[in-house]
Image (cartoon, coloured by chain):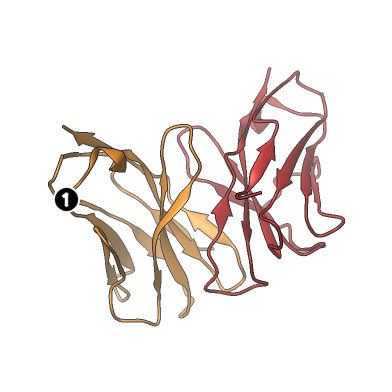
Chain colours: A orange, B red
Amino acid sequence: AQTVTQSQPEMSVQEAETVTLSCTYDTSESDYYLFWYKQPPSRQMILVIRQEAYKQQNATENRFSVNFQKAAKSFSLKISDSQLGDAAMYFCAYRSFGNQFYFGTGTSLTVIP
Amino acid sequence: GAGVSQSPRYKVAKRGQDVALRCDPISGHVSLFWYQQALGQGPEFLTYFQNEAQLDKSGLPSDRFFAERPEGSVSTLKIQRTQQEDSAVYLCASSSLAGDFTDTQYFGPGTRLTVL
């Protein structure tokens, strides 16, 4: 079974600075998708960014970008110019070809004004 | 509606009671997923529907858990004889396509179940 590991339970960043959240995963599959989801307190989980495993180019969405290292099975999220609204729990997720999702345990991000 | 809705938002049950949790996916969405999120943990996959067909129920923790989607839209997750370890937030998500690897899941707000 696939596993997703987020080794940073909590992170903090100064407003306008950059922060990187780590994620590693374990799989024997060659084709899959990776995701970062954001879950604000008491609010719905929303998709931040996704990466196709067969693409070498790292995905970017405005201030959010990933560093995808397929051989190392690493998928980190970089948030640039951090804003107060970025404060949330961030989950890394793996989607298998069989439509199952595997989530990490999350990283709680605090943004300091 | 504009998004995935779930009801009730909060449910308190006495141990041994049966509960039913409802999910209204985005209109027209083919795929529907249920997840269980324990406190301080990430969501764990429970089951997956494509229209009315339950294609994967490998994540259901016991035979006390049952899910259905009889008309391919609204889904209900039923838990029989609830136990304290069933306390969690139950998330529903839907996506527009059938088994499309690229498809985005849209999550509902969840139902927080507390079993006393």
- Picture coordinates of residue A71 (x, y %)? 30, 76
Residue A73 lies, with reference to residue B4, above or below; the image says below
- Picture coordinates of residue A14 (x, y %)? 13, 39
Residue A20 lies, with reference to residue A28, above or below; the image says above
Residue type at mark 1? Asp
Q: Quadrant of residue A86?
A: top left
Name the residue located 63 percent from the left edge and 66 percent from the top edge: B96
Residue farthest to the front, as pictured: B1
Is residue B87 toward the left or the right of residue B23 in the image? Answer: left
Name the residue located 25 percent from the left edge and 37 percent from the top edge: A84
- Picture coordinates of residue B37 (x, y %)? 56, 40
The one nearer the camera, A37 or B29, is B29
Is residue A95 something that shows in the picture? Answer: yes
Q: Residues within 10 Å of mark 1 (few under 14, many from 20)?
A: some
Is residue A113 toward the left or the right of residue B90 in the image? Answer: left
Is residue A27 something that shows in the picture? Answer: no
The one nearer the camera, A31 or A86, is A86
Q: Quadrant of residue B38?
A: top right
Mark 1 lies on residue: A81
Is residue B79 toward the left or the right of residue B25 in the image? Answer: right
The one nearer the camera, A95 or B24, is B24
**Chain of the residue displaying label 1:** A
Q: Which quadrant, please, contains the N terminus of chain A?
A: bottom right
Is residue A34 toward the left or the right of residue A72 in the image? Answer: right
Name the residue located 16 percent from the left edge and 32 percent from the top edge: A113
Q: Quadrant of residue B57?
A: bottom right
Classify mark 1: helix, strand or loop: loop
Name the residue located 53 percent from the left edge and 46 percent from the top edge: B43
Residue farthest to the right, as pictured: B70
- Picture coordinates of residue B17 (x, y %)? 82, 24
Residue B112 lies, with reference to residue A90, above or below; the image says above
